Image: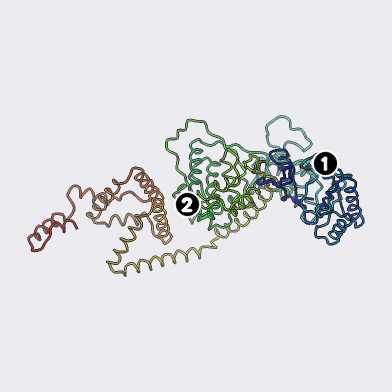
Amino acid sequence: MFDPTGWFAIDAANARVAGVVVPSLDAGLALLGRGRVASIVGRLRLGMSAVDVDVDGIHGHAITEEIARWCAQHDTWNLVRPSGPVDGRNHVFIALPPEHKQLREYIGALREKHAVAARSIDLRTAIRPLSAPHRTGPHPQALGDLREALRTLPRLAAAVPTTTNRAEAPGRAPLKPRPRRRMDLPPEWAAYLRTGERPEIGGHDHKVKPWGSSWEAIATAWLLRCGHDAASAWQEISGSHPSAMGKAKARGRSWWIQYVWNRAVRNDDAFEPVRQIDPAVAAAVAAARDVLDDLQWRHPARRRPSLLLVGHHILDRMERTNTLRVPVPERDLVLDTGVSDRATIRQALRDLDGRLGRLDTSTFSTTKCDSSSFEFEVPRLEGVREILPPGLHTPGPKEVRGLWSTLPRASHQLWRTLQRTSNPQTTGELCAAAAIVENRADEPSASQLRTTRAALTALARAGLVQCDEAGQWMCLTSPPTVAVREEAAARHAEACERIEAERAAYRAGARSDWSVARAAALKANRAREKAWWDQLERSERLERAASLSDRFRSQSIDEQERLKSAWADRRRRAGVDEAERHDHWVDHLSPATLERESADRAMWFAGLAPPLQQAYVAAWRRHRDRYGISQATQGAEMRRESTRVFGAPGAGRDQAFLESQAALPGFDRDSVIAR
């Protein structure tokens, strides 16, 4: 009778308890008697209404009886339930919408007949459910046979969608397994289905059980783990050797689904593998998550959800694989994060590069596009000693693929924040801590609080967080609800189908013409830029270069690193090798210029504070490592050594010329030397 999303809590004064979110009836009933929560109220479904008869004694009973009789005369389903401790007050649930013209007219006439106020015979859509007590008294029971009444309740417009196949008998509908990529069965179990020869299995009790033999149960579990659903698994069983899966074939598909397949799915859902994780990897990933929390504040609030989704899922992959370097194909990240736009994924990777870790693009090969991709690496913490035994990593809700595509955009960052918070948090505190506000010091606006509350409510309905009687939120360790997992699996399956089609088209060369045209356009654009620069007067080039150099030096270290990476990536897309370009520039500097530039840079660096020196060195090292740039070329080192031994070429000649000009009238030796 009730909308599953319309619950709220009331106190003993019949006022809604502010801040307490009730995601489900069960969650609401669990709050009863805690804090100010006295009872739970729900919103009726479309097509349903209730009359609250708030009149005492025999007079109230008479009004209730008249309403029930009117429903019977109009062949309308109804249910009467005493509303509280005062005799005569009742609730009448009616299977008619509140805007039903005849019902509204009848209720109006009833008020006039009994000379009572509108709230004494109140037609409502929000009311206490049958399982909730009165706010000040006992828990009244519905009158009559409740089970029979609910069985005859007509189907309502907003009925809860069910995953049960109506063609199946109750309990025999096949459960959906968690999505997996289809793969071949292990050789011994493929041979069992093909030849009927039973492989060796552990244990001793392999007699036929109510759900079949151990071999049939294990074979079904392997079919599930290899990516089969109930239909394709039964097809494999039906076509197997006559000696294989004998009991399943004899009892039929419905029996196999109820006693073997569904049992395997439930066992698989309940299984949470515990993986070992190296302490050094765990420490580096934890430090990277701290960096990511700080990094999000450097981006606009609208870009933070995608940045955090991509960043945290990369770190999740490192925990799963127990390594600090993992492949990051864009399409895999689409499947992991639920972010469907690959351009958004690409932007997030660029934002993380050089800040959270290093994005290595050299690992992707166009000739091996089906087996290579970009890779992401976070630094190993210095000083971490690997003396402790490996830690354990238990998969959490974040690893339910497709989950975040079913929830509001802010849900992920709120869940991550709660996961790392030991104390319950209010909605306002979470709004700020999860970076839904624009700046750290900002107070949450009404709109931001609504966004936060809606995302938290969705998380609570999914079974990932809960709200207590004080309106504070905490994280749960339980897996998402079955309904959420099934919706996530369906979304993930759709995304997998789309991604597989994209990959097939790409590997078939469907984008090769576009790639060639793009590379040609980038090279042509770079040629135009170079031609424009070359046609400028030398004085203008020097002036522009000096202005741009000053602007660059005024930037922060992070901004300088970002700009250098952006310029290098743009040149690389135009076909310029960054390492070769750097070496060519160094090798073509004159010895005097190279020596002067080195001395100037050394003096500038010596004048920096030690923390700034360390930050600059780290940024330079990251840039060189990212683009394979050498610290010094062989030719430059040879010229440096020659200058140190023999002096700069032409230095004696320049000195002799200076001395010869010193005798000329008006010649200022000191100003020339200063210049």
Q: Is residue 569 left or right of residue 548?
A: right
Q: Which amino acid is tagged 1?
A: Pro
Does residue 446 appear in the picture of this structure? yes
**Residue on which disc 1 sits:** 85
Residue 636 position in % (x across, y down): 27, 51
Q: What SS does tag 2 mark? A: helix
Residue at the extreme front of the image, as rendered: 115
Which class describes the residues within 10 Å of circle 2: few (<14), some (14-19), or many (20+)? few
Residue 192, disc: none
Residue 427 position in % (x across, y down): 60, 46
Residue 521 position in % (x across, y down): 44, 67
**Residue on which disc 2 sits:** 298
Identify which residue is drawn at 90% across, 46% down: 58
Identify which residue is drawn at 72% across, 45% down: 10
- Colour setting: rainbow
- Cα–Cα gap, marks 1 and 2: 58 Å
Q: Please name whichever residue, 530 or 121, is drawn nearer the observer in this view of the structure.
A: 121
Q: How many marks?
A: 2
Q: Please name whichever residue, 211 or 541, is drawn nearer the observer in this view of the structure.
A: 541
Q: Is residue 42 left or right of residue 81?
A: left
Q: What SS does tag 1 mark? A: loop
Mark positioned earlier in the residue sequence (1 or 2): 1
Which class describes the residues within 10 Å of circle 1: few (<14), some (14-19), or many (20+)? some
Q: Please name whichever residue, 178 or 16, is drawn nearer the observer in this view of the structure.
A: 16
Q: Which amino acid is tagged 2?
A: Arg
